Structure formats: structure tokens, C-alpha cells
Amino acid sequence: MTVNIAVLVSGRGSNLQAIIDNVENGRIKGAKINVVISSKAEAYALDRARKHGIQAVFLDPKRYEKPEYDQAILNILESYKTDLVLLAGYFRILGSEIIAAYRNRILNIHPSLLPAFKGLHAQRQALEYGVKLAGCTVHFVDDGLDSGPIILQKGVPVLSGDCEETLAERILVQEHLIYPEAVRLFVEGKLKVQDRKVIILD
Ligand code: GRF
């Protein structure tokens, strides 16, 4: 059986690209990315989707009240019989109805070692705090901000002389490895959520 994937984006879509590549090269087997939904018209992620023959939809937040916007997303997810929702640089908070409808079936990538540095500008927060180890986290999405059960994490060193851009770049390399890996584990049925812990049955 194929796992139907939908990806929500707002920007450049490099994580989306990493997942597309892993589906195309067969590392992620038994999955299909059916649709990419963007909250920004100019998101490069939309071009990436089209280049790979994936339906690309721009949903303009200005045209909806928040509950209607989330309902519109939900309608698209349902119309593609979506099994798994991936947030990949999606700049909005997901509505609680979507989270409830897709409990333990929504993944997000965050550029910090959660639970440190939730929310915006995680790399800047890490630099300002002075940590020596930064990194990224793939987690299930729950009702809180970047608070759901953690699936995979990868640390990267903070080097003297780092600025936000250099640190973000070093973290991004790892994001492109652990996000597709987490998707593979999900698709292969190897993730089991127990309270707030994720057991990996690999
Ligand atoms: C990544 O740093 C990701 O961790 C965060 O937003 C950024 C998205 O980058 N959630 P991209 O659009 O995947 O290139």
C-alpha cells in the first residue's frame, strides 16, 4: 500500500527537495508525494514540486479567516487521501482541527535541538545563548509550539566566528539527512508513539 504524502511549505523548499530526491531514488519506498501546499505565492518550493510533476497549490491566507484557511487545507489533504503531512518550512501555526484529524501523522523539522530554542530564529537563539552544540529535530506535531514527540535529532558544533547564516547552513546539511530518514521510518511503519516518546522499531 502506498503512503500518500502532502507537504506544507512557505519558502525555498530545500527540505522538500531532499524528501522528493529520497522518494525518487528509492530510499523512501512505498510513498508518493501527491501535493505541495504553500502559504506564499512566491515560494520556490512550488517550482520544485512542479519540476517533479507534483501538484503545487498556493492557498492565499489573505483570502480566508484562519478557521476557513485550515478547513481549505483539510479539504485538500482529504481530497488526496493523505496519510502523512510534512511541514517543511511552513511559516504558519497549524489549526487544531488538522492536528486532531492527523494525530501522530504530521511531522515537522525544526533547526534546534528541541526542547531548546523553540519558535522563530532558532539558530540565532542558539548563538545568542552561547551553546556549543546546535542541531536539528524531526518531531511529531501536537498542539504546542515545537513540542511534539521527538523522532530524530542531530547535533552540529557551533564554531567560533559562526554567524546565523553559517550555523544555519551547517544545520541544514543535517536537516536534509534526518528529515528523509524520519519519513522513511514512518512510511515503513517503524515509529511507535508512547506518551511523549517515540520508539523506533528499526
Ligand atoms: C529549515 O531550517 C527548517 O528547519 C525550518 O525552516 C527551514 C525551511 O527551509 N522549519 P527549507 O524551506 O526546507 O529550505
Image: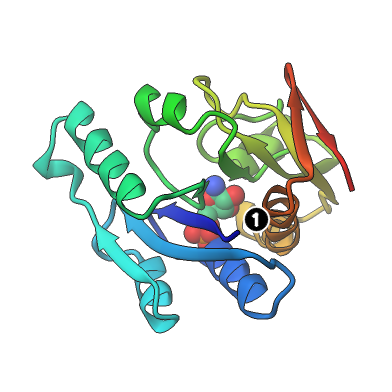
- For this view, does 58 lie left or right of residue 185? left
Q: Is residue 123 above or below residue 70?
A: below
Q: Amino acid at mark 1?
A: Ala
Q: Position of residue 200 (x, y in %)?
A: 85, 40
The one nearer the camera, 117 or 34, is 34
Asked if residue 178 lies left or right of residue 78, the reply is right
Determine the residue located farthest toward the top in the rendered image.
195
Q: Position of residue 3 (x, y in %)?
A: 57, 56
Q: Is mark 1 within 8 Å of ligand 1?
A: yes
Place residue 93 in its image quadrant. Answer: top left
Instruction: Tell me the quadrant of ligand 1.
Output: bottom right
**Residue drawn at the location 67% of the way across and 62% of the way down:** 169
Tell me the residue at 21%/29% (across/down).
66
| Left or right: 122 in relation to 63 | right
**In the orientation shown, which residue stands out farthest toward the right?**
202
Residue 44 higher or lower than 184, as above or below: below
Mark 1 residue crowding within 10 angstroms, few (<14) / some (14–19) / many (20+): many
Residue beneath the point at 61% across and 79% down: 24
Q: Read off the residue under disc 1.
A: 168
Task: State the SS at label 1.
Answer: helix
Image height of 97 relative to 47, above or below: above
Residue at image position (33%, 69%) is: 55
Q: Nearer the viewer, residue 164 or 81?
A: 81
